[in-house]
Amino acid sequence: MNKTKLFIIFLFFLTLATSVKSQFFVSGGTNIGGALPTVKTEGSSAKIFPGAFLAFGGEILVNEKLCFNPQLGIDFRMFDYFANQTKDTIVEAEIMGVIANVPTYYKADIHGKVRLFGLYAELPIEYRILNSTYLILGIYGSAAPYKSDLININIRIGEGGLLPDVDSSYNNKNKINNFDAGFKLGGRVIVNDRFSLFITGYRSISRFYKMNAVKDENGNDIPFYYTQARIGLEYRF
C-alpha cells in the first residue's frame, strides 16, 4: 500500500467519524525507541531518550466490541548512537628530519544524535476483550518536517602524539527518509467514562535511512527500521 492510498483511507474514516455516532478524544504521553539495524553491527551501541506525542481523533463504533479510531498527531523522538572502529594503516611522518612511512593503526569514535519532529496519521482497530480492556491493532504513516542526525567523529592515530587527532562533525539528515509507515499493536484500559490508559508498540516497514546510507565493513547496505513504544493517557469528550 503506497502513501497516497494510506492517506485516502485515513481521510475516509475521519470523514465517516463526523457523519455517524462517534466520540472524539485527545491523547498524549511519552514515546521511546530508535532505528534498529537488521544485522548485528560490531562496535556499535545506542542510547534512547523519552520523547513526547499528542494526538486527536474520533471513535467510529461498529458494534459493542469493535470500533475504529482514526487520528492525527504530532510527536518528537530522539536517540543517540555510538560506533568505534580500529584498523591498521600507514602514515607519513618526519623522524629526525627524514620522511618515513610508519605502520600504525587508527581508532575512529563516532557519536550520532538523531532528533525528529513528525506529523502522523493512524488507523487503529480496537476490540474489547474484557469489560474495560481493548486490544489495539492498526497501521500508521508519518512525515518528518524536521529531522537531524548530527554526527561527531574523532580519529586518533596510534596512541596519539605522532599526529594530532582529527575531529569533524556534520549533519546526516539528508540520508533519513522523509516518510515512514508501519504497524501498531497494543492495549487500552478504561479508567472511567473520560480517561483511559494505553500502551502501544510500533514497527516500521519502511526504511529509516535511504538505500546505501549505512554500510558494513564490506560495503554492504545495512537497513534500519524504526521501532518504538508509546505510553499515554486518553481523554474522551
Image (spheres, helix red, strand yellow):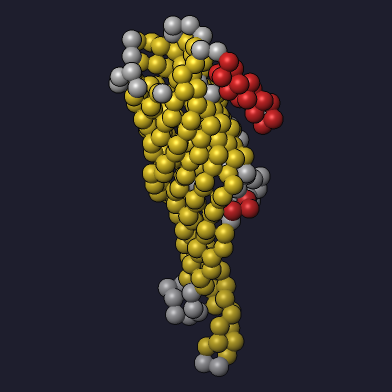
Q: Residue at x 42, y 73 (%)?
A: 159
User: From the viewer's perspective, is 236 left or right of 99?
Assistant: left
Up the image or down, 89 lies above or below 60; here it is below
Residue found farthest to the bottom: 97
Q: Looking at the rendering, which quadrant does residue 54 occupy?
A: top left
How far across and down, in percent of the image, does residue 28 sit? 41, 34
Residue 16 visible within the image: yes
Residue 137 visible within the image: no
User: From the viewer's perspective, is 206 left or right of 74?
Assistant: right
Residue found farthest to the left: 191
Up the image or down, 34 lies above or below 82; here it is above
Q: Nearer the viewer, residue 53 or 155?
A: 53
Can you say which quadrant of the picture contains the C terminus? top left
Q: Nearer the viewer, residue 32 or 93?
A: 32
Q: Looking at the rendering, which quadrant does residue 181 occupy?
A: top right
Q: Nearer the viewer, residue 50 or 100?
A: 50
How far across and down, in percent of the image, does residue 112 sit? 49, 56
How far across and down, in percent of the image, does residue 185 sit? 46, 24
Up the image or down, 60 lies above or below 234; here it is above
Q: Residue at x 51, y 64 (%)?
A: 153
Q: Residue at x 53, y 23 (%)?
A: 70
Q: Residue at x 50, y 51 (%)?
A: 114
Can you say which quadrant of the picture contains the N terminus? top right
